[in-house]
Image (cartoon, grey):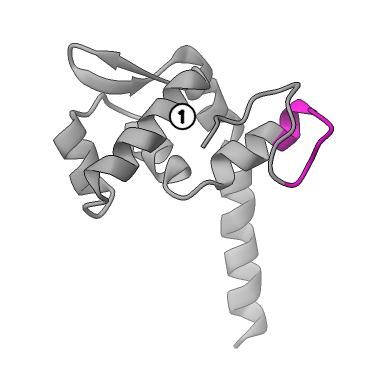
Amino acid sequence: MTTPKPNQAVRGSSSGVAIMAVFDLLGRKWNMRILWELRSEPLSFRALQERCDGMSPSVLNTRIKQLSEAQLVVTTTQGYQLTSLGLTLMETLDPLRAWAKEWEAQLSHSQE
């Protein structure tokens, strides 16, 4: 499976528009979870696997490879960690997390 990148056709879009590549990359199973787990500290392969509910090693290897090719994750002596680009992505998603909490609260109120 190829890594989604800007200026290339991706699942759901042949336009090559960068945002579509981001949506494809982040929409792939486990990628967001891996980024989330690496947001605050480097993790070894085993620690990352445990935090991701024991996903299979082959899936984790595939996802790390994709995120590395997308320049969001790098391997260091401390383990896997987000690159500066990966960190800015997670910061960019902060308003979306805030919106999701607001959405959750709105849905909770409407169900009462």
User: On the rendered image, what quadrant is the C terminus found in?
Assistant: bottom right
> Front-most of 14 and 19?
14
Horizontal side of residue 56 vs 110, given as left or right: left
Disc 1 packing (10 Å; few <14; some 14–19; many ≥20) = many
Horizontal side of residue 69 vs 5, given as left or right: left
> Front-most of 40 and 47?
47
Figure check: 81 above or below 62: above
* Picture quadrant of residue 10: top right
Horizontal side of residue 21 vs 31, given as left or right: right
The residue where tag 1 is placed is: 66
- Residue interval drawn in magenta: 12-20
Figure check: 68 above or below 21: above
Residue 56, x across and y down, in percent: 25, 49
> Front-most of 78 and 21?
21
Question: Which residue occupies the extreme front position in the image?
Answer: 1
Q: Residue at x 79, y 28 (%)?
A: 16
Residue 1, x across and y down, in percent: 51, 37
- Look at the magenta stretch and give its main secondary structure: loop
Q: Amino acid at mark 1?
A: Gln
Q: Residue at x 53, y 22 (%)?
A: 70
